[in-house]
Image (cartoon, rainbow, N blue to C red):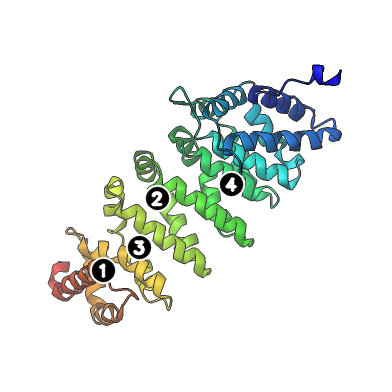
């Protein structure tokens, strides 16, 4: 007789609703943890598929719609520290996947986050918790795929914290923070250009002093690479002109050019060439280049990269010609 009363298979919406109920109970009932862990694994399988089947678009859409009702995302983020490691990993992957799920051609995650931007405060502050940093960091990077979210984080007081997070003693957490920082500065061009022009003074003071002049080799190498990518982006042309008109910035880049690390030298060259290429060099920039001409020409002459690169060689030859042609009287 039992076979006549088989329980109906749960729909994606049922699993989300049950998960939401369990999350609400996590503060009061530890016995629900196993059930919650099982549900999160099921939700992840619906979104990602498994070795036997691909994800079904209709099921993913149903799950996504239900998930962004009644603050399931908020509950999951806030309850994450109470979950076991496997459940945290599954939850992180679920949140990441949901940022990309479209329902009727709309990213409903973006709409939800627009009215719940304070959740980013929780995710960014996660870098201060060793157990949560990598989970919250991965979620944060996916959430800033949405321009409205990236703008919120860029314009928030949290942005200054990244200069310290990138230098945390735990290598994995510092690297994760650096990846998020880079994503914030690279993904949404117009938003980043506006942020840099409005916050130029404090941002580049922190960037130079804490990252480019850091005692940590990896921090310096990553920072000079991101700086080159930022300044060479057309959206940031006004910021680039301002940066390469500064004597202090030039001195920092010249010091990086003298590093023993070849990779730092190469990345520093890509920024240094912008100072030389600037057709409206301020007098003090010309003065420094002329005063250090022989050292610079010798250093650039010795600068080689492992693989043959015609563009690099052409850029280097042009920089050498420009420096060699500078006249002290140009300072006047």
Residue located beneath label 3 in the image: 249
Mark 4 or mark 2: whose residue is earlier in sequence = 4
Comparing labels 1 and 3, the label whose residue is closer to the camera: 1
> Where in the figure is residue 288, as x and y percent of width and height?
26, 71
Mark 1 or mark 4: whose residue is earlier in sequence = 4
| Distance CA(mark 3)–CA(mark 2) | 12 Å
Comparing labels 4 and 3, the label whose residue is closer to the camera: 4
Residue located beneath label 2 in the image: 201
Check the picture and name the quadrant holding the C terminus. Answer: bottom left
Check the picture and name the quadrant holding the N terminus. Answer: top right
> Where in the figure is residue 20, as x and y percent of width and height?
71, 26
Residue located beneath label 1 in the image: 312
| Distance CA(mark 2)–CA(mark 1) | 31 Å
User: Nearest the camera: 46 or 152?
Assistant: 46
Q: Is residue 220 above or below residue 135?
A: below
Residue located beneath label 4 in the image: 137
Q: Which picture quadrant has residue 195?
A: top left
| Distance CA(mark 4)–CA(mark 3) | 31 Å
Residue appearing at x 62%, y 50% in the figure: 134
Report if the CB atoms under discs 2 and 1 are less than 8 Å apart: no
């Amino acid at each position: 007789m039992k076979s006549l009363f088989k329980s109906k298979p749960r729909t994606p919406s049922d699993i989300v609703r049950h998960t939401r109920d369990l999350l609400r109970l996590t503060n009061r009932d530890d016995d629900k943890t196993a059930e919650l862990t099982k549900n999160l694994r099921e939700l992840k399988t619906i979104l990602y598929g498994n070795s036997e089947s691909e994800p079904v678009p209709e099921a993913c859409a149903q799950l996504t719609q239900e998930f962004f009702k009644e603050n399931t995302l908020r509950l999951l983020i806030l309850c994450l520290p109470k979950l076991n490691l496997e459940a945290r990993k599954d939850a992180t992957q679920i949140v990441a996947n949901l940022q990309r799920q479209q329902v009727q051609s709309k990213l409903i995650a973006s709409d939800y986050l627009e009215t719940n931007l304070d959740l980013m405060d929780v995710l960014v502050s996660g870098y201060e918790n060793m157990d949560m940093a990598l989970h919250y960091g991965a979620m944060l990077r996916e959430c800033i795929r949405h321009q409205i979210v990236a703008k919120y984080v860029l314009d928030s007081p949290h942005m200054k914290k990244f200069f310290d997070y990138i230098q945390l003693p735990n290598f994995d957490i510092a690297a994760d923070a650096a990846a998020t920082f880079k994503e914030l500065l690279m993904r949404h061009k117009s938003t980043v250009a506006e942020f840099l022009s409005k916050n130029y003074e404090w941002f580049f003071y922190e960037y130079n002093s804490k990252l480019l002049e850091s005692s940590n080799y990896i921090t310096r190498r990553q920072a000079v690479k991101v700086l080159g990518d930022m300044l060479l982006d057309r959206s940031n042309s006004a910021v680039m002109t301002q940066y390469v008109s500064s004597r202090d910035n030039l001195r920092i880049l010249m010091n990086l050019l003298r590093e023993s690390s070849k990779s730092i030298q190469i990345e520093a060259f890509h920024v240094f060439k912008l100072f030389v290429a600037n057709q409206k060099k301020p007098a003090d920039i010309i003065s420094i280049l002329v005063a250090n001409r022989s050292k610079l020409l010798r250093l650039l002459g010795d600068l080689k990269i492992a693989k043959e690169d015609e563009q690099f060689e052409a850029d280097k030859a042009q920089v050498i010609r420009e420096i060699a042609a500078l006249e002290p009287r140009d300072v006047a």
